[in-house]
Image (cartoon, rainbow, N blue to C red):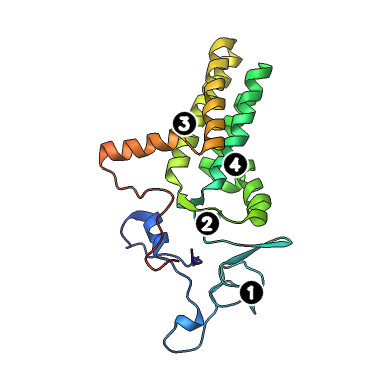
Amino acid sequence: MRPWSSATPSSSSPGGGRSRHLARRTVTPQSRTSGPARPVPGTAPGTAPGSVPGSAPGSAPGTVDFGSKVATRTAHPYRDTDVIDSRAPRFNQAAIGLLALGGVVTGWWPLFAVGSLQLLLGLTLGRRWCVACVTYFELVQPRFGEGELEDSRPPRFANMIGAVVLGAAALTGAAGISPAATALGLLVAVLALLAAATGFCAGCNAYKLVCALTGRRFVSCPLPPLPGDA
């Protein structure tokens, strides 16, 4: 897949933010018919035309500097929130699943509260507040590269469900209803670890089913390649 541009999409594009993302393409000097190449606003002096804002000087188009490593990315993890690296939700699900499993094994309900709080912070304040997300984007993705992009709405919906169920587990645990807390925590642990291991996300599929039943427009994930992509 060729690099995507981080340029701001037109609000008049059909299909919402994710469809607008599909239309964004990196513009290189070779693709211009006339006139000198202009750098993207916000990039450092000497940065190659078409590079993502924030990239290191001299970087190839579509690259972003991560400390000592540079990883080629087609979407910015914190700005392009309409899409997400398909590996990131699985990494987050593994973290949440292990946290929930720890609460089940130890019987310590505050672990359920921590997992619910982490999901809520990521949902309300953004991916920078999600510890597992930041760990993936800053440490794992730069080393192993970006996975396929997918629509971010299904995993976001799954996170909402996980936050509610873990919150209920924490509340029932605090109220002394240990069997209910254990059952709810185990449910999250099993589904989250299953999604992390196999890619089958129950919450994601529930979102797609709701879209199909209500007739809401939805583009399958992973996102299909654009015409002309190799």
Q: Is residue 142 above or below residue 216?
A: below
Badge 2 crowding class, 10 Å Cα cut-off, few under 14, some 14 to 19, many 20 or more, is: few
The x, y position of residue 21, in whole percent, is: 42, 60
> Which badge, 4 or 3, comes first in the chain's sequence?
4
**Distance from the alpha carbon under mark 4 to that under mark 3:** 17 Å
Dot 1 amino acid type: Ala
Residue at image coords 32%, 36%: 210
**Distance from the alpha carbon under mark 4 to that under mark 1:** 32 Å
Residue carrying label 1: 44
Residue carrying label 3: 161
Q: Is residue 137 above or below residue 92?
A: below
Residue carrying label 4: 91
Residue 53 vs residue 139, the one in the foreground? 139
Query: Which quadrant of the structure image shows residue 143?
Result: bottom right
Residue carrying label 2: 79
Badge 1 crowding class, 10 Å Cα cut-off, few under 14, some 14 to 19, many 20 or more, is: some
**Distance from the alpha carbon under mark 2 to that under mark 1:** 18 Å
Dot 4 amino acid type: Phe
